[in-house]
Image (cartoon, rainbow, N blue to C red):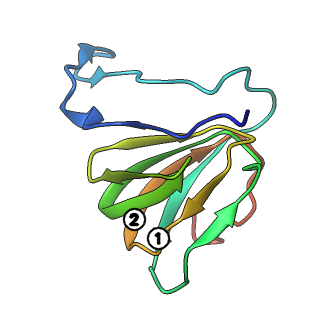
Amino acid sequence: MAPKVVVYKAVASQPLINGLPGGQLLDFSAFPELQGQAVAGVYRNLGTEPEFDVTGYPEHEYKYVTDGELAIVQDGKRVSAVVGDLVYIPAGSSFRILPTIFTAVYFSARKPAFTSSKL
């Protein structure tokens, strides 16, 4: 059985704890058994492509939805995430991506694939 995508609802509304002076934090999850690099970035889905299947997602990934709605179908059920939700996509998971429009900050357990010389 393939691992399942998990949506953590409204993570930004959870109470924070004091961290460094003048800052607060909340660790809501971590990559399981991370070995090697991790990368962070912004992903925007334009909703212009038809739905399609993903079989065996290649890496562990988190997406924090900042705009719109991220929607998939998993085991015949629609699963969606909206602004403030965190989505965990485990390596090896399979699902159908629906053509919704959203923006998300992502954190992936992989080497950088695309970089910008402006950073």
Residue 85 rendering spot, x and y as whole percentages: 32, 43
Residue 10 rendering spot, x and y as whole percentages: 24, 37
Crowding near pointer 1: few (<14 within 10 Å), some, many (20+)? some
Q: Is residue 8 above or below residue 113?
A: above
Find residue 75 and name its label.
Answer: none
Q: Is residue 103 above or below residue 34?
A: below
Question: Mark 2 — residue?
Answer: 103
Quadrant of residue 95 within the rendered picture? bottom right
The amino acid on which the numbered mark 2 sits, given as a three-letter code, is: Thr
For this orientation, the residue located farthest to the bottom is 48
Question: Mark 1 — residue?
Answer: 44
Which of the two residues, 102 or 22, is positioned nearer the viewer here? 102
Label 2 sits on a secondary structure element that is strand
Q: Is residue 34 above or below residue 18?
A: below
Label 1 sits on a secondary structure element that is strand
Q: What residue appears at the point 26 percent right and 53 percent down from the top-left corner?
A: 83
Q: What residue appears at the point 75 percent right and 61 percent down from the top-left corner?
A: 113
First in sequence: mark 2 vs mark 1: 1
The amino acid on which the numbered mark 1 sits, given as a three-letter code, is: Arg
Residue 47 rendering spot, x and y as whole percentages: 45, 80
